[in-house]
Every structure is written in C-alpha cells, then in structure tokens.
Image: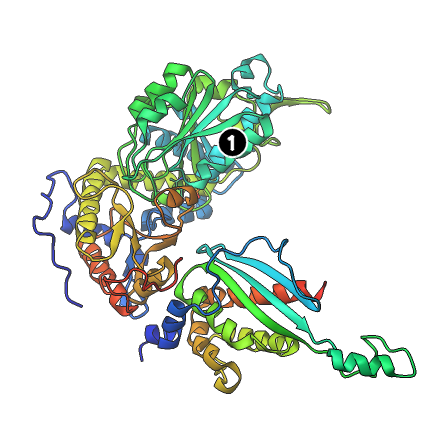
Amino acid sequence: MSDLQNLYQQIILDHAKARHGAATQALDSIDDIGMPDGTYLGQSHQINTTCGDDVTLRVVVLIDRPTPEQMVIFDSLPFEISGDDPRLPQLIPYINQVQWSGDGCSISMASASVLHDLVTGLPVAEARQLIDTFRDVLRSRGKIEPDEEVLGDAAAFGGVSRYPARVKCAMLPWVALEAALNEAQSL
Amino acid sequence: MTPFPSPTSPPPRSALALTDVEVERIRNDFPVLSQRVNGHPLTYLDSGATSQNPISVMEAEQEYYEQRNAAVHRGAHSLAVIATESFELAREKVAAFVGAHTDEIVWTSNATEAINLIAYSFSNASLWLGGPAARRFRLGAGDEIVVTEGEHHANLIPWQQLALRTGATLRFIPVLDDGSLDLAAASEIVNAKTRVLAFTHASNVTGVINPVDDIVAIAKGVGAVTVLDACQTVPHLPVNVAALGVDFAVFSGHKMLGPTGVGALYGRSELLQAMPPFLTGGSMITTVSMEAAEFLAPPQRFEAGTQRISQAIALAAAVDYLTETGMGRIAAWEAELGQRLVAGLAEIPGVRVLGPGVGVERLGLAAVDVAGVHAHDVGQFLDDAGIAVRVGHHCAQPLHKRLGVTASTRASAYLYTTTQEIDLFLATLAEVRPFFGVTDAASSNSIGGK
Ligand SMILES: Cc1ncc(COP(=O)(O)O)c(C=O)c1O
C-alpha cells in the first residue's frame, strides 16, 4: 500500500461519501430547540484556518432519570429522597444524539462520520476517553498503532498521523465534540 | 506516468519569451529547486504565494552581514555610512524597477503593511492629524471607499477597518463570471462621494489582469485616490507605476525572488508629502520635545525604527536578477505557461478553471475546482508526487464565494518553471478523480465538499 493509499484508506473514502450523522441543513442557532427533561444540548463550531474546513457539531446528552415506576417506590418510602440522593443508583450521562454539518476535505468529513457512529449511545466519560485515545494516536507521528478494538473505524485514521498538516483535519470534529460536551455538561 | 497529451494546437511560441534552455540555466541559480520531495523531484508551482531565491539574492544578504552591517541613517562612523549608502541604493534600484522616483518608495514589511500604512495615514488624517495639507485624506460619514470583489484580503480588510473607524461606507465593484471586473457597474458605483478606489492589478486566484487605464480614468473622473495592489504583477510583468497613473501601488519582495520581511509602498510624491505618518518613533523625526515632534519628509517619515536593511539590499539584488533576465521576456514566458495550463486543464474531465478560459490573457497561474474532490485532498495527492501547489481560498474568500466555491487548487509559475513541470501537474491532476473514486456521472458522488 502506498503512503497515499495508507492515508486515504477505503473506510475513509466511504465515510467521506456516506457522512453519517450529517444534518440536511446547516446547524446554526440552538436557541429554539425544545428539549425533553433531563437532556442537555451542547454545540461547537470549529474551523481549520489553514484550509477553511468547517464543522459544526451538536450533541444531546441525556441523564437517566428514575422511571415513573421507580418514582412510585421512592414516594412510598418512609423518608424523603431526592433525585440526586447518593443512595440511588448512579445516573450516568450519555450521548443520546450527535448531529453535524460541515464543509471540508475527505479526512475531516470522514472523521465526523466515524465519530458519529462511535460515540452515539456512549456514556460521556467513555466518549471523552475515546477523544483522548484518538488524539494520542493522531499526534504520535505514526508511532502509536491504533487499536481497532477500541477505535473501530477511527483506527483507519492512523495513517493521517504521518501527515502533520492533516492531523488538524481529522481532529476537527473531535475537538468540536469535546467543546460541545463541555457546553452540555456546564448547563 | 504518461506525459499529458499536449493540446491539439499548441499555442505559438513567442520570439520574445525565455527559451527552454535559458530556463534550465536559470534553474541552476535556485538551489531549492533541485530538491527531492516525497521521493520525487520538487515541482514548485506555488510562486504566487512566495517565490524562491536565486543565489545572488542570498549572497547579497550574507555579504551585507559579513561586511557592512550597521544602523542606517543614525551613525556617523564609516560602516554606518556604507550601510546607509547601500540601503538607499537599494531604494533607487527598486524605484527605477517600477518607474518611480527614489523618494516615492517607502519600505514596508510586505504589501499588507503598505496598504495598512495608507489606511492608517488616512485614518490619522481623519482625526485631524497632519494639518491642512492632510485635509484631502479626511474621511467621514457620507464618504465612500471602493474596492473590488476580487481582492486579496490584504486589500479588503484594511479598507473595511478604515470605513469602520471613520464612518465612511465601503462599496465594491462586482466580479463577473469570467473573473473580470464589471466595468459598467464600476462607473455607477464610483461616484462623487468616492474618495478611495483600491483594486488589484492582477488576481492571485483567476490570473485576470485588470484594465488599470479604464479604472484609473473612472477614479480620476471623480477625484478619487487610486491604490493599486501590484503584488502579482511587479514580479511577473514590466510595471511602470507612473505610466499607469495610479496614486499608490504596493508589492512584496518575497514574491519577486527577494527575501521575506520587505515590501514597498509607492506613493506619488505630492501625496506622500501631505500624508501624516502611520508608525512613529525614531528615525522619522527632525526635532522632538516632550510635547510634540516634527517629522521628516517622505520616505523617512514613514519608516519609523530600525529598518529591514539586509532585506532591502537583497531585494535590490533580486531586482537586478529580474532586470538582467528581462521582465518582458519573463512575462512572455509566463504567458505561454499560463496558456499551456488552461489549455491542458480544459481537457481534464471534472476540472473547472476559475476565471478566463483558453486564449484570454492571464498570468502564469490557474486555480481550479475539481468536481467531487476537496482542494485539500487534491493538494495532498499532488504533494505525494512532489508537486507543490496552493490549496484553500488563497486569502480571497469573497472571490471564491462569488465563483461558487469555498476552496480551490492553484498552480502558479515563475521564470524558473518549465513546460515539463506544467505537463506533469496536468497529468497528475488528471489522476485525482480516479484515485478518489469520483466518476463523471455523479457529482453528488462527492468526497468532502458540501
Ligand atoms: C494579490 C495579492 N495581494 C496582496 C498579497 C499580500 O502579500 P503579503 O502577504 O506579502 O503582504 C498577496 C499575497 O499573498 C497577493 O497575492
């Protein structure tokens, strides 16, 4: 496989065309979106100034609430209990939905598509770990062999780490996810 | 790689142009060109962004540091005198090269700073600095500044900011589909309120060479000051600013075989005399008290602080190199390369040239949109073959938007570019869409892009 084929692996070219999770319209304002209880919205717009690649990514974080049945039981307890009582099972925030819009090279567009598939449904903490792992691989200049078990399709971006000028393209949606998660969790 | 099939009727070779043999000899003066990149000989097609330096330019800079380095216009010792003389001789050479008087050339860091110098001087005049002489540069509500839709950001943003600071209105002359200016619209947009008309001599994206005479005539008709961005012409065509009749012109040394860090502002003597300074401090004053200062005449009035001496001297060496080669011959050579480029591009499926087509005058450059493949990916593919091109918006976002794209891939030639390099670029570009699996039938079959 030539260097160039290693950079543009078929998985990347396929994702660049398929664009999983891409919104049909550009995502801009998040003001007027009615969100159900217990969901938190974060959004981030990232630009690669060297080439103008542009990604807006929106994430919906859901924090599990006790079900109505559970609530009935709580209400019948002989003492008061609140939703964040440590005696209750941990409520884990997870990523309920990822949506993005953008314009850019095949690396950045494929990266957003792969990201969508990987993190949807993942607990936020695990998604954050994945972002760190992906970043480590990309910054390694080819030294870290990506673990396909962990990174799935994102392992195909291992070749990008040998092209310092393209690392930012691949990172763009991941940086957007990180910022969007920070925003969602600050609410 | 198979050579690219040459266009059915190759453009006639001009007797004036450099010959292939001369270009080969010229290349020997540019050490950087003999490098290998990614296992291939370097094919440098990014001179529109920055040019390479001949040995004589690098030697001029080194010789200065080895034998003449001293602060100019400041000391009385022998070295300082020699340094000052060399520095001023450089100004004389660069002035002569563009048809200006020596004291009409102000050194700047680059063209961008030169445009900012004009804008900030006008801004200062609008704050009533510079006294009655500078009244003609005052801008305020009701005044208009006109640029074109085809400008490099360097000739747009300083004017946007000047408008914001002064309350003047910024307007623009539209660009037509073929990249040329809408001159009919220009005669309406430029009116009695127009105080400044800033426009590029040639586009760094489309390669279009604008009709300076017509535009200057329109500006003169309403008494507007003209500012010419000559970044893409001074390095490539014979340019005489006085004959063009513009009030100001700017260009950058690094695009004309010179070093980075030096550029020049040309201003008609009478105008520079009347303008208040932009940067202030040492070396630009006559007498100073704790309250106020009097300023030197131009060009020193606009050269505050220790100057880029070695760079100016090296730029003069670049001008010598260009003059000895002959600007007319360089221009004719690049015109041939430009035509070879567009003729070849016209034959590659899915490739659209931004700007004029085959047979229309253009610089030795072409920017293209490759259907279904983002410019960044095109550039990567070419780089793998050792071909250096510019990808992105080339600091001209509004122009790209006007031409319906966000980014493009640009190949730009110079006096050291060979026809083989152009052909290699064309042949390699033709392989891009097949590599990315983009077929002619479906443009929706897009990799990247919108
Ligand atoms: C047409 C044009 N104007 C202005 C500039 C700005 O030149 P510099 O960055 O050297 O100031 C450039 C170079 O990129 C250019 O091509």
Residue at image location 90% in from the left, 78% down from the top? A80
**Residue picked out by circle 1:** B117
Residue A125 or residue B335, whichever sits in front:
A125
Q: Position of residue B261 (x, y in %)?
A: 46, 44
Residue at the spot 56% in from the left edge and 75% down from the top edge? A119
Q: How many marks?
A: 1
Q: Tag 1's secondary structure? A: helix
Q: Is mark 1 within 8 Å of ligand 1?
A: no
Mark 1 burial class by Cα count in 10 Å: few <14, some 14-19, many 20+: many
Corner quadrant of residue B265:
top left
x, y percent for residue B409: 33, 54
Task: State the residue at coordinates (38%, 40%).
Answer: B315
Q: Is residue A63 left or right of residue B346?
A: right
Relative horizontal placement of residue A78, taking residue B51 as reference (left or right): right
Task: Determine which quarter of the picture holds residue B194.
Answer: top left
Question: Is residue B99 shown to the viewer in this render?
Answer: no
User: Splitting the image into four quadrants, where does ligand 1 fall?
Assistant: top left
Locate the C terminus of chain B by quadrant: bottom left
Q: For the residue marked with disc 1, what is the amino acid?
A: Leu
